[in-house]
Image: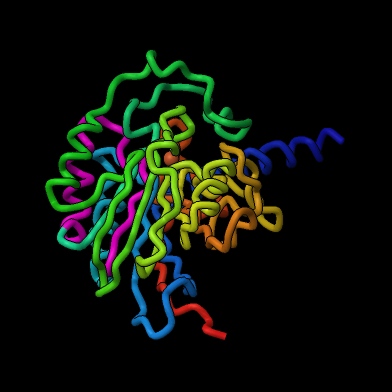
Amino acid sequence: MYVRLRTLIPATIAAGAAVASYATVIERNWFALRRHEIPVLPPGSEPLRVLHISDSHLTPGRKRLMSWIRSLDDLDPHLVVSTGDSIAHPQAVTCFLDSLGPLLDRPGVFVLGSNDLHAPTMRNPLRYLLGPSSGIPLKKRAHLPWEKLCSGMTAAGWLDLNNRRGRLTAGGLDIALAGVHDSHIRKARYEEVAGHADPTADLRIGVMHTPEPSTLDQFAADGYDLLLAGHTHGGQVCLPFYGTLITNCGIERARARGLHRHPVGGQAWLHVSAGLGTAPTAPVRFACRPEASLLTLVPRDSG
Ligand SMILES: [Fe+2]
């Protein structure tokens, strides 16, 4: 027994160290481009490429992430949608805007996440896996320059959809949009955008940071065709053959990332990005690579 333990304990420690190194160094920088085709356009429309980015939680040292975000312009998207939690450091606004680079010359829209407003605080990383991250009083977290972040994107022509509606033309299509601020910190004001989405538009998109079921229900009931959200990080640390452990909000584990239908109140599609970064206090990714998504919107089946 003693010999077995003498072998088992070092082996377990070595395996744990290997997994931790993989999760913090390799997978966290192993960016994936996800591609989905979504039938939401009027019959006869040309495909529309939408680049969905989220949750980069950028800090100035993340050069690989910055360079990968910048390379996404090569996908030639017609529209860019950013669903928040873009920064995690007071000096990260310029880094994020530089990372977007040529993407800012394209039509774009954004909402904020809670982490754009408040700097991270040190806490036990395991707490990220134990449930929704609502335990830290916001007044104890330093202010991040979200106003500068917003003005940098709006100066480039992107639409601020924080509790606002918007309208733009992309790829020759007339697109009606609405968005809400982050419900995770009770800043979502759906009543500001409530009402049926314009049925005369070619496409209706609802944008939010946190895919809280009640918010999804409202967008879907108002006739939005496509709902885009982030926040979950896809769980960030997943178990092989089991998947997401936590979603950090009310959505179920099965829809913590990727493309799904939203079953309530309409025929909306939901895409949840697993995000580009990590919670700053838990800089690991396991079985859940950081990602951006290229959504190719195509005509609905006219039959
Ligand atoms: Fe996030």
Ligand number 1: quarter of image: top left
Asked whether, in this view, residue 294 is left or right of residue 75, the answer is: right
Q: Which colour scheme is used?
A: rainbow
24 in magenta: no
* Residue furthest right in the image: 1
Give, as a single range, the part of the protein colored magenta. 78-104
Tell me the quarter of the picture where residue 76 sits.
Answer: bottom left
Asked whether, in this view, residue 301 is left or right of residue 190, the answer is: right
**One can see residue 57 in this view:** no
Image point (23%, 37%), residue name: 92
Question: Relative to the observer, which residue lies in front, 192 or 33?
Answer: 192
Quarter of the image where the C terminus is located: bottom right
Tell me the quarter of the picture where residue 204 sits.
Answer: bottom left
Tell me where residue 93 appears, x and y as whole percent. Answer: 21, 38
Asked whether, in this view, residue 206 is left or right of residue 64, the answer is: right
Asked whether, in this view, residue 4 is left or right of residue 46, the answer is: right
Tell me where residue 147 appears, x and y as whole percent. Answer: 21, 32
Question: Relative to the observer, which residue lies in front, 258 or 206?
Answer: 206
Image point (20%, 44%), residue name: 95
Tell me where residue 220 appears, x and y as whole percent. Answer: 53, 54
Question: Relative to the observer, which residue lies in front, 28 or 15?
Answer: 28
Quarter of the image where the N terminus is located: top right
**One can see residue 271 in this view:** yes
For residue 162, above or below residue 234: above
For residue 54, above or below residue 1: below
92 in magenta: yes
Question: Relative to the observer, which residue lies in front, 260 or 276?
Answer: 260
Tell me where residue 296 appears, x and y as whole percent. Answer: 40, 73
For the image shown, how many numbered marks are present on the structure? 0
Image point (78%, 36%), residue name: 5
Tell me the quarter of the picture where residue 235 sits.
Answer: top right
Image point (52%, 25%), residue name: 134
